[in-house]
Image: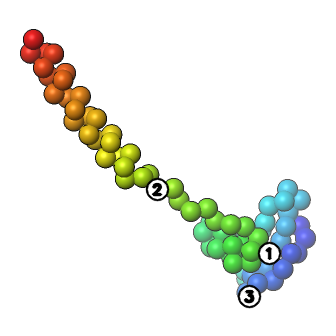
Amino acid sequence: MKEIKSVGDNTIYEKKSGRYAVKDTNKKFVNGDDKAKILADAGLITIPEPKVAPAEEVEEATEEASEEAPASEQAAEE
């Protein structure tokens, strides 16, 4: 691993695979959301925004389901 930069109390390393490792002042590796935040603040990665389902598609799906239910009930009665 080669040292890329020191950011505050953390040191960022690049592995041979191209991934990053972060060590804190206690020489312990940092993982998870903390690591992602440190790397994003250093400008090495970007954190994608979570996708939100559009409200229109959800409303259409519920309307279609409510329209299909009476039709199937009418067929069962005949």
Residue furthest out toward the bottom: 8
Choose the circle earlier in sequence order: 3 or 2. Answer: 3
At a point 9% along the width and 15% down the height, the residue shown is 77
- Percent position of residue 36, x then y: 66, 69
Separation of marks 1 and 2 at Cα, in angstroms = 32 Å
Q: Viewer-proximal residue, 51 or 60?
A: 60
**Secondary structure state at the residue bearing disc 1:** strand
Q: Is 53 on the left or on the right of 34, as rendered?
A: left
Please determine whether, in this image, residue 65 is positioned above or below residue 55.
Answer: above
Residue 12 x/y as whole percent: 80, 75
Between 46 and 68, which is closer to the camera in this rendering? 68
Residue at 64% across, 74% down: 37
For label 2, the residue is 52
Q: Nearer the viewer, residue 6 or 45?
A: 45
Residue 8's label in the rendered image is 3
Q: Quadrant of the N terminus?
A: bottom right
